[in-house]
Amino acid sequence: MVLSLAVGMLALPAADAFADPDIGCGFGTQIWTGSKGVAPKVLGATTNGTLGNQTFGISSGTLGCRQGGTVTADAKVRIFTSANLESLARDMAQGRGETLDAFATLLGIRQGDKNAFFSFTQSHFAELYAGDAVTAGEVLASLERIMATDGRFAAYLTRG
């Protein structure tokens, strides 16, 4: 977990450059700009990840990336989820764990709601991790969709 957090923290400065709120900046984002739906986002994210061009774009201010700025809470959640996808899956399946607790904290889940959130993610695990090759973006999109249907957790979606 410490290694995952360290890697995630090293990536935080890059998160500000995200041109697209889901897939970030990069060549894939440039190719699929203006496209709507899941397929273009997945293809854009795959292209960005495969080519590893976001670092270049951020440092050069190209490919839809920009230099400087502030890392957003959404970016922190995306980075953490990407860096800890397997540990998060294990913890959600068990309904407890260090990674799930840290994830809940990043989402702004109040201490008094955490145990219920842990149970909630455990009961919806099959929806959150629907497949062997699920991505962090897919997990987060599923979580948002599922949280929106629950009165207690829907309120967390509107917090800034």
Image: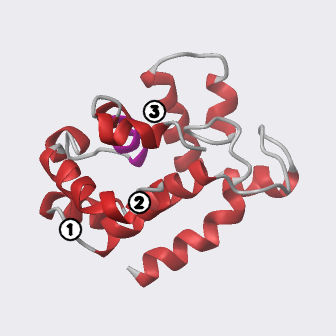
Mark 3 residue type: Val
**Residue at horizontal 37 percent and vertical 45 percent from the top:** 135
> The C terminus is located in which quarter?
top right
Q: Marks 2 and 3, Cα distance to the nearest angstrom?
A: 32 Å
- Left/right of residue 86 with respect to residue 52 in the rendered view: left
State yes or no: discs 2 and 3 in contact (Cβ < 8 Å): no
Under circle 2, the secondary element is loop
Residue located 77% across and 49% down the image: 57
Residue 52 in percent (x, y) is at: 61, 53
- Counting residues from the start of the chain, the first of labels 1 and 2 encountered is 1
Q: Which residues lie in the magenta part?
A: 136-142
Task: Report crowding for label 3: few under 14, some 14 to 19, many 20 or more residues within 10 A (C-alpha).
Answer: some
Say which label, 2 or 3, has the lower sequence index: 3
Q: Could you tell whether 77 is left or right of 101 in the image? A: right
Q: Identify the residue at image location x=64%, y=35%.
A: 20
Q: Which residue is mark 1?
A: 96
> Which one is in front in this view, the residue at disc 2 or the one at disc 3?
2
Circle 2: residue type: Arg
Q: Which residue is mark 3?
A: 42
| Front one among 32 and 150 | 150
Does dot 3 land on a helix, a strand or a loop?
helix
The quarter of the picture where residue 83 lies is bottom left
At x 51%, y 29%, the residue is 41
Percent position (x, y) of residue 108?
Answer: 48, 56
Q: Which residue is mark 2?
A: 110
- Disc 1 marks a residue whose amino acid type is Arg
- Mark nearer the N terminus (1 vs 3): 3
